[in-house]
Amino acid sequence: MHLLRVQVPDFRGLKNIDITFEKDFFPRIFPLGSLNGGGKSTLLQLIFVLLHCSVDDEKKPFLQNLLQGFQVADEEARKTLAIIDIWHEQKIIQIVFFACEDAFIKRSPYFLDTVNNTEDQNYISFSSVMQFKVMEKQVADLKLVNNSLTRSSERLDTIKNIEDNQQRFDMAQKEFNFIQQLVSNSRTSALISVINSKKDVSIKEIQSFQDEIKQKLEEVENNLDNLKNAYERAKRVWQKIIEYLQTENMTYICNFSSEIKSNTQPNEALLCQLNNTDIKETHDFLKILSEKIFLSAPSTQVFLFLDRATKELLFKGQTQINENYFDKLQKSKFQLQGFFTYDFMAVDSLLEAFKAARDKDFKEAIETDKYGNNYQTLVNELRFLLNGKKININKDLSGITLNLEKNGETIELYPEDLSHGELKRLSIYIWLKSRDIEDAIVLMDEIEIAFHPDWQYQIISDLKEWAPSNQYILATHSYELCQALTPAHVKEIEPKLIKQESESEQ
């Protein structure tokens, strides 16, 4: 899997972006340089969210957050968001992501010729998918009310046969309370005065209560029939929309709002069109791609794919940030499996890496009668990574300590004794290893933070050694990092990093 080219005509601060990442270059590591404000982080986030979130409904809200405010001009039928070329299985697959409004499909000959019914025409909208999903839930809720009312009426038949007045009263009161909770804004009158004023209830009063339930049942059934009809119509038209898009090799992704601050219904739609592949293969390809795209960045970065309320916490009082922002950021990392922040060592990931190595050794012992060396290899690699410091796992696998042999003396250390740079380098290594990130597209933002200039240069060799099958795109401000590769590897967007350096030397 290799990202060959990305084009972004106009998104936020990105203008006329067109960058090629050559598949024959080795190593497959491409610094993306610019001075501050060039939009490197925005570009990486856009690529990641488009490729990681487009096929999973639970992740699509991150897309909607990112696209909020992206507008399609009135005179345009569609507006290109990004064009991404992917090398996969010996061919180039081009994905064109674009935004459009309802006019895009309403003006198509397909709908002008095939949808003549006025009521159906009212449902020719990208928002109809949300409408029929809402109606689907409403139908389910009404069915539940209908079934509950029916069972309640049946229970009242049993209550009428109870001779003991107190018992009959208690059960009737319970049934009355159940109906009040079941049907919102309902003021069933037959028993309300009885329940509130005395400790007795007659069979006639219960019968009157039943009659009111039956009236409510008729009302619910009527509403249910009307809703089912509307639901089926919306679903039928939506199916026509999908069929039309498929004829054009297009796929609907989600709706979003062009208004930055708005509670109105999102009427703009994000679609994608795949070139050089069959429409039947689109979902499977996007699914594979979503599992092969990763983003790592410092947690102090502003993440455009978080919801607006969360982003605004960054610019409010410190108390609100501590209580809310980082909790929500952590939650997003659980929802976006390909998203990672590498500020500090993830001890849990480190422990998992040791457990996985242990399990591989045990599996080899069962299969070959020889215990494997995966655990020891990991210990040695980490010792080399940490310049001779050895990581020790607690016997109960609850945590770690470290020690360093120096001048014949064993010095005990703790994770907090490591430098920021050591912790970060270790966290990147463990992330790649623990997630088995291979043959993937790995986007890394400001990887050089906390690294000595020598380590900024060295990180290129590290990535090449740790997971050489990956393609890495590194948004950076570091000259040292760029110098670890050929000039052709370095990609730039304005204001250019290398250009500014050469000018400053003159």
Image (cartoon, rainbow, N blue to C red):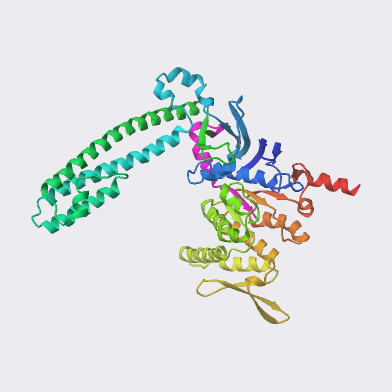
Is residue 285 part of the magenta span, yes or no?
yes
Residue at 63% across, 74% down: 414
Q: Nearer the viewer, residue 382 or 327?
A: 327
Q: Position of residue 178 (x, y in %)?
A: 25, 51
Direction bottom: furthest residue:
409
Q: Nearer the viewer, residue 386 or 183?
A: 183
Q: Position of residue 363 (x, y in %)?
A: 48, 63
Residue 306 visible, this angle: no
Q: Is 339 positioned to the left or the right of 478 in the image?
A: left
How many dots with numbers?
0
Q: Is 107 positioned to the left or the right of 177 in the image?
A: right
Q: Position of residue 254 (x, y in %)?
A: 51, 37
Q: Is 124 positioned to the left or the right of 97 in the image?
A: left
Say which quarter of the image contains residue 374: bottom right
Direction right: furthest residue:
506
Residue at 36% across, 30% down: 230
Q: On screen, 388 above or below 266?
A: below
Is residue 172 part of the magenta span, yes or no?
no
Residue at 20% across, 50% down: 193
Q: Position of residue 273 (x, y in %)?
A: 56, 32
Q: Nearer the viewer, residue 66 or 372?
A: 66
Q: On screen, 448 above or below 502?
A: below
Residue 402 visible, this angle: yes
Say which quarter of the image contains residue 85: top right
Q: Which residues are magenta?
A: 269-297
Direction left: furthest residue:
163
Residue at 24% across, 46% down: 148
Quarter of the image where the N terminus is located: top right
